Image: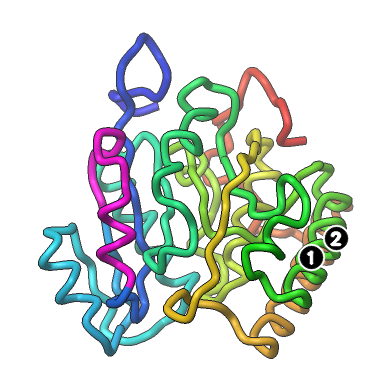
Amino acid sequence: MSAGGSGSGGVTPKVVVVMPAYNAGRTLRMTYEKLPMESVSLVILVDDGSTDATLEVARDLNLEIFVHNRNYGYGANQKTCYAEALKAGADVVVMVHPDYQYDPTLLPQIVAPITRDEADLVLGSRLKGGASALQQGMPWWKYVANRVLTRLENRVFGLALSEFHTGYRAFRREVLETVNFAMNSDGFVFDQEIVAQAVAARFRIAEIPVPVRYFPEASSASFIQSSVYGLRILLLLARYLLYRLGLIPGRQFQSLRSRYTRLSTGAGR
């Protein structure tokens, strides 16, 4: 734990929001303005080669900005986000997509299980509570695929979560220092790779329900992109199973801090 220490001795943790941005110029301002800034120490935006007004809006909002010289991908964007948040001394890192699809006002709720020392990684689930995501505009094929993949992931990881495919996440600092996220994909499957790494390192994972918005300005993967993403998740699960069985070395799933152990294991197993 860094000097700020999340949830210890009444000391307020340093909460850093990271925004992986790509062509988010139309939604960035409304997302930022809904953040409960009394709960946030710093907002970092990483621009992944946007061709719209994302950088102009970010500068106008006086955000901490890092710019990729071209579009490297969603996973590559997260790698920069987390590396810079750790450098900034974050105790808790919250990923908030700047497309306004997830509700920024729920940030205190997604951080709370970490500050109460009940979890190390918290996911904001669109599916916790049933079919509400469908009512809020999630395409039916995406809903069905999400449910099927989540069931498989729960079986492989030994968890009982309602969704793994959310972009609204909060990490205790130790998670990002321990898992080897630099080895992960530069694409969308990064989200599931880092969860697999957290499970392998025995971190505790929790979730809170979050509403989701689907509207033209919000980013959304196409059917083909989602299909490729689903296949890559299946390959990830196969690799993780082979690693757990000791059939492959699985360096990607091995801790960077082998001497770090938690005294309680909780829901991560």
Q: Is residue 206 magenta?
A: no
- The residue lying at 64 percent from left, 54 percent from top is 126
Q: Residues within 10 Å of mark 1 (few under 14, many from 20)?
A: some
Q: Which one is in front, 248 or 195?
A: 195
The answer to whether residue 156 is left or right of residue 178 is right
Task: Decide: is 246 above or below 218.
Answer: above
Residue 147: numbered disc: none
Whole-percent x and y of residue 182? 48, 62
Q: Are marks 2 and 1 in contact (CB under 8 Å)?
A: yes
Q: Quadrant of the C terminus?
A: top right
Residue holding disc 2? 242
Residue holding disc 1? 239
Under mark 1, the amino acid is Arg
Q: Quadrant of the N terminus?
A: top left
The answer to whether residue 268 is left or right of residue 136 is right
Under mark 2, the amino acid is Leu
Secondary element under disc 1, as helix, strand or loop, is: helix
- The residue lying at 30 percent from left, 76 percent from top is 26
Whole-percent x and y of residue 20? 38, 66
Whole-percent x and y of residue 238? 84, 66
Within the image, what quadrant is residue 198 found in? top right
Task: Decide: is 142 above or below 62.
Answer: below
Looking at the image, which residue sits at the far front? Answer: 135
Q: Is residue 40 magenta?
A: yes
The answer to whether residue 251 is left or right of residue 130 is left
Q: Which one is in front, 17 or 235?
A: 17
**Range of residues picked out in magenta:** 27-43
Secondary element under disc 2, as helix, strand or loop, is: helix
